[in-house]
Amino acid sequence: MSNQAVAMPRKTRGPWSVAFAKLARDRAAMASLAVFLLIVLACLSAPLYAKWAGVDPFASTLDAVIQIDGADVPVMEQSTEGLGLGYTPLGPTWRLGNYFLGADSQGRDVMARMLYGGLSSLLISGAATIFTLIIGTAAGLIAGYFGGITDTVLSRLLDVLWAFPIYLLAISLSIVTIAQGIRIGPIDIESGSLWLPVIIIGIVYVPYVARPIRGQVLSLRHSEFVLAAINLGVPGWRILWRDILPNITTTLIVFVPLMMALNMLTESALSFLSIGVQPPAASWGTIIQDGQALLYTRPLVALVPGLAIAVSVMALNVFGDGLRDALDPRSKVRLGRD
Amino acid sequence: MKKLLLAASAAALLAGTWLAPAQAEYLKEHRGGTIRLLARSAAGTLDPHINYTDQGWQMYQPIYDGLVAFRKAEGMDGFTIVPDLAAALPQASNDGKTFTFKLRKGIKFSNGQEMGVKDVVASFQRIFKVSGPTSGTFYAGIVGADKCLADTKNCTLEGGVVGDEAAGTITLNLTKPDAEILYKLALPHAVVLPADTPAEDMGSKPIPSTGAYMISAFDPNKGMTVSRNPNFKQWSEEAQPDGYPDVVQYDFGLSEEAAVTAIQNGEADWMFDALPSDRLGELGSKSMDQLHISPLSAWWYAPLNNRLAPFDNEKARQAVAYAIDRNTLVKLFGGKVLASPVCQVLPPDFPGHEDYCPFTKNPGTKWSAPDLDKAKQLVEESGTKGQKVTIIVEDTAISRSIGVYLQSVLTTIGYVADVKPISSNIQFTYIQNTNNKVQMSVTQWYKDYPAASDFLNILFSCASFREGSDASINIAGFCDKDIDAKMQKALDLGVTDQKAADKMWAEIDKQVTDKAPAVGLFTPKRLDFVSKRVGNFKFNRQFNWMITQSWVQ
């Protein structure tokens, strides 16, 4: 029996299957993924929520009056004591669809803005991640594979970008483009467009992707299968596309959640400084900025988006770590021991 | 104590000498101590010939003197011109083009130097040598100013400012009569400094002064210490009264929230910056006795670019004026206690002001409600419906919220609007430069001195518009030759008959308002929050709270 068993061909799992199995067994990563997907789903429901609640999260509604337990309640309440100075926005009602998280200083429903804000933050961080990965991967592949003067020029360009502190560069680019947008040849991006933060954030993180990719390509360039393909006269672009790119895919996949978390933080910081998403559009960063002036009376307006950013970024980072562990070939050893 | 003071002040006012008895009575009892002030940041350069900020001008009042001064008195009395370093107000001669000032004797700078004719002449030259921000406007009418503006380093103002050491007189010659020249001479840009003061921006270096106080230490990142001038002997209570505290300690760097808490805890006595909006309710109910609300001669407005679509169309501009709900803006600013709706250019209680509001539901003298139907109709008639409008606002909570509200209004009446908050440090110059193609913005104008021309002529004359310049204060780019000619006529008339001139300014105010080059939003009020120990709070309409006329012990 035992001899027969040894002789039978053992069914081995493919690397992707192993990775998925390992990822599925990482409870922290899966829980983080679930949390993140919940956030994404909630944000995608923003238009539906606003329609259901009957609110416009972008228009000032300082004179709005809502009903709570049959009583009319103004969204902005004027102080009636003493000198009667100032207006205080409505606090949380904890009733979904009826100013659940209260109002901001423009009388807008904070819950509806939170969902729309999340949508902007996710869209920008997601699109910027794709932008960074495409440009960074292309730069890394070309520099690593072709070497020589091409590598020198590209690497120096990346060094220049790398030399600037990330936030300083992002803030500088934002300030330059915020009022007039970007107009270069056929590219015409208006100043209020969400594409502006996408491109700015995307550009500043290119070296973070391009440099490790270049390193990997440099070592793959001298591997036997690539040398064989070169000697067989396979064109360079085909070798890059068919032989090298598949070998760096796992690295790129690991980059996705980690870059997205980083981009989300950068977007929030830029929007908080009024140089990211522009009012009346919302992002979690702009809502924190709106809430800054209400910290004393309505601290939730700033706290909730801050918490949303923290939870999203943490979920992405934990999931990214899990993904890296799952896709790391060295961890197969650990898998075997399990 | 407060009632006693009010009674004393009322009695003094009735007698026509509001200050002297009250001050004589209180001076000994309350003299001394350190008054502690807070601001988020310093007001820029210490140089009084260059600094052009409310914060700086307020602090200079007990420190520097000019030939004349605004009376250090409460309320509208603060708009009166009184002799300061000059012994008396000058009589105009040579058809209103020449003024001769007789200097007081025995006044010393804080460094011990005697103040004299040569210091006055050198100070006038220095206004041009340091390219003072108002040298080309307020003081451009002095004979020789044109040469000084062209060649600042070698400015002599020959024939313009003539000193006579023997007689102790200064003669000021103008190229043409100027009804507002004494106001301009009473501003900090025309104070008298020692003749040997370097002809360059002194930045953080204090310059010796003649006033009751002097700047004894300054660090733009930390604070400023103002102490008594050891060489000061009061010569005119109206122009430069002695003060109560021995030291004014002005600290920089604390946020508005932290400053409020410091004042509540008695760790500071006053803050320069506006109170945070989320503390207003609490302070208005719990600290009423520590709050002082005072009217300001100021205007929050939205310039509409008269040279760019869609606001190159008068009907489009009027549509915006009809659509804006001033009550909502007042609400955003903190409520009716802190601001009043406005339609016209000249602020209430200002020379030339006559209530006027054409852009409201029931046109007349006061704003009542927005007229959205009329606004939409005007947008249709103008043929500008659907055009894109960008509103540039300052990156502050209040400006941003006003911008967001205006964006809603423009969207409602048919435009595709967006709002851009940009840093407060650059927004004011950004919106002035035509190269930036700003269609609409939100800004404020605070009077330099109490004259209608300081609003109408400066903000809406053809000469105030400069293509491609950061210093084009006619932000709307409005230029109407007829109104311009009328403004010139009113300026000339003011030399001989100020009352008639003010009547003319009232007409000009209406004409400018009708053309809607900018939309008036509201008139703000100043809210000062002081510690419990601050007594004798007096608000001067020209330079705000008179810091050293309050006591802390």
Image (cartoon, rainbow, N blue to C red):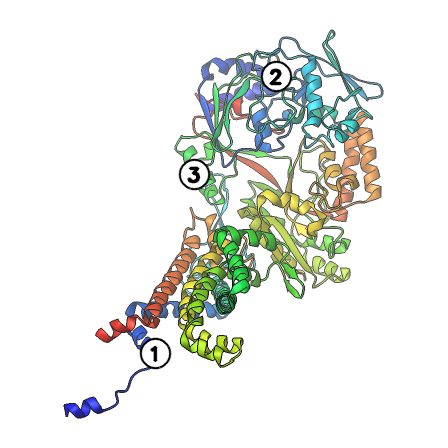
Cα–Cα span, label 2 and label 1: 96 Å
Q: Amino acid at mark 2?
A: Thr
- Both on one chain, marks 3 and 2? yes
Cα–Cα span, label 3 and label 1: 58 Å
Residue linked to disc 3: B258
Density class for disc 3 (Cα within 10 Å; few <14, some 14-19, many ≥20) is few
- Above or below, B445 against A176 in this view is above
Q: Count all numbered tags in the image, as a single digit.
A: 3
Q: Percent position (x, y) of residue A262?
A: 43, 60
Question: Subunit of mark 3?
Answer: B
In percent of the image, x 40 and y 62: which residue is there? Answer: A312
- The numbered mark, 3 or 2, whose residue comes first in the sequence reads 2
Residue linked to disc 1: A15
Q: Amino acid at mark 1?
A: Pro
Q: Percent position (x, y) of residue B505?
A: 77, 36
Q: Quadrant of the N terminus of chain A?
A: bottom left
Between residue B13 and residue A295, name the one nearer to us.
A295
Q: Quadrant of the C terminus of chain A?
A: bottom left
Number of the front mark, 2 or 1: 1
Residue linked to disc 2: B17
Is residue B80 among the parts visible in the rendering?
yes
Q: Farthest residue toward the left?
A: A1
Q: Amino acid at mark 3?
A: Ala
Question: Subunit of mark 1?
Answer: A
Q: Is residue A312 left or right of residue B208?
A: left
Name which quarter of the figure residue B406 lies in.
Answer: bottom right
Between residue A275 and residue B263, name the one nearer to us.
A275
In percent of the image, x 65 and y 63: which residue is there? Answer: A188
Q: Marks 2 and 3: in contact by CB < 8 Å?
A: no
Density class for disc 1 (Cα within 10 Å; few <14, some 14-19, many ≥20) is some
